[in-house]
Amino acid sequence: MQENLLDKLSKTVRLSDCENIVKIYKCVHTTNPAGDGIFALTNKRLLFFIDSERKTTYFTEMPIESFSGINYTYGKFFNNSKRIPAIFLMLLGLMFVVFAIFKPFVWVNTLWSGIFYFFSAISFVAGIFFLIKAFTVTFKLEIISAGSYKPFIAFENSLFSKENQTSFVISALPTKQTENMVKELGSLIVDIKKA
């Protein structure tokens, strides 16, 4: 696999004299453009490119001296923007049940009771669906450059980023190598800077 990544890297970028590859990570699967996000660390630069299934080219680089750190978030979190509609729909479903059972209005007869029960069931099931969907897997990876207010590159598992309006965010999902890259990249770069 490493030889395959080296081959793809050599087709994307030319290394300078005395520049050696230290480590390559296939660390994210991007969704737009669809492909594999690959980080290559050399003794001089941090390179990123997307090996796209649609032959779309995306490449960016950062000198090692500009590297400042990594922000990484991965896990299941409760999404409040989905919880509010869930609670609303469940309460609406309960309200329809109250109308069907207690008939607070004169015009609520057997036909209307059936209609209220029907809408109650639909609202309640939709509310439960939204409540289950409120638990979402969150992924965010940012490579921070020194002296900048925005990340060098950022990845999220969402097409719409509310927190990071100041930088380009690539929609992506983690791979098996993501956590390993997060653990190693900072210390590798510190070692390269010392050398």
Image: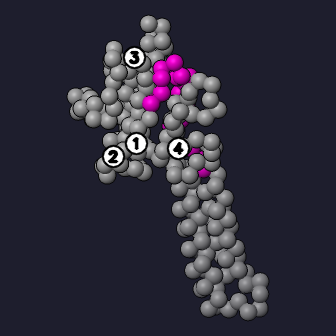
Q: Is residue 70 magenta?
A: yes
Residue 169 — which label? 4
* Residues shaded magenta: 61-79
According to the picture, the residue beneath numbered tag 1 turns out to be 58
Mark 4 or mark 1, earlier in chain: 1
Quick check: marks 2 and 1 in contact, CB under 8 Å?
yes
Nearest to viewer (mark 3 / mark 4): 3
Q: Residue 169 at what x, y percent from top left?
A: 53, 44
Please tell me how many numbered marks the rendered image carries.
4
Q: Secondary structure at mark 1?
A: strand
Q: Residue 56 at what x, y percent from top left?
A: 35, 48
> Which residue is at the far top?
195
Q: Is residue 104 magenta?
A: no
Toward the viewer: 62 or 34? 62
Q: CA distance from mark 3 to mark 2?
A: 26 Å
Q: CA distance from mark 1 to mark 3?
A: 22 Å
Task: Judge left or right: residue 141 versus residue 3.
Answer: right
Mark 3 or mark 4, earlier in chain: 3
Whether residue 27 is visible to the viewer of this picture, yes or no, is: no
Q: CA distance from mark 3 to mark 4?
A: 26 Å
Q: Residue at x 62, y 91 (%)?
A: 111
Q: Secondary structure at mark 3?
A: loop
According to the picture, the residue beneath numbered tag 3 turns out to be 43
Q: Residues within 10 Å of mark 4 (few under 14, many from 20)?
A: many
- The amino acid type of the residue labelled 2 equals Ser
